[in-house]
Amino acid sequence: MKVTPNEMVALGYGKYFRSDAVIGLEPIEEGRGPGKRTHVYLQGHTTPMVASRSESAILRDLIEAPAEVIDTREQLELLKDIAEALESIQPMLRSIVRDQGSWDLDRLEERLKALLGEEE
């Protein structure tokens, strides 16, 4: 189980808190209903917040990265792999690819480095 720091987790009805600030979840047993399903204990707060979402839904969001985040991380790793592979292409082969395939690998490598925040 891993909570990712600085990510926001929804408690429902427009309430969002940093995932690493959540220190406890407790289902509301009595009086549970719409808008009142879980007590969420937060770091630095003496009383719990009332969340409209179930404790299992909040917990799932806390420990699982959203699909978009996972996809973005995978795409970033792929771009890093491509940039690394481009570095190993020799100048003669780069010239052939540029002349025969109309694909400027030098320019592509520069764009990848800029996108990844790497210095040339």
Image (cartoon, helix red, strand yellow):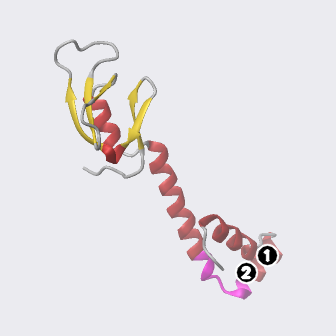
73 over 16 or under it: above or below: below
55 over 28 or under it: above or below: below
Where is residue 38? Give x, y as percent.
26, 25
61 over 115 or under it: above or below: above
Q: Which residue is mark 1?
A: 98
Evaluate if marks 2 and 1 touch, with contact meaning CB atoms under 8 Å apart.
yes
Other-residue count near label 2 (Cα within 10 Å), few / some / many at <14 / 14–19 / ≥20: some
| 100, 23: nearer the viewer | 23
Q: Which residues are magenta?
A: 85-93
Other-residue count near label 1 (Cα within 10 Å), few / some / many at <14 / 14–19 / ≥20: some
Residue at 25% in and 31% down: 47
Where is residue 85? Give x, y as percent.
57, 75
Give residue 29's quadrant in the image. top left
Disc 2 to disc 1, C-alpha distance: 6 Å
| 64, 6: nearer the viewer | 6
Disc 2 is placed on an element classified as: helix
Where is residue 93? Give x, y as percent.
71, 83
1 part of magenta stretch: no
Residue at 43% in and 23% down: 13
Where is residue 111? Give x, y as percent.
70, 68
Q: Amino acid at mark 1?
A: Arg
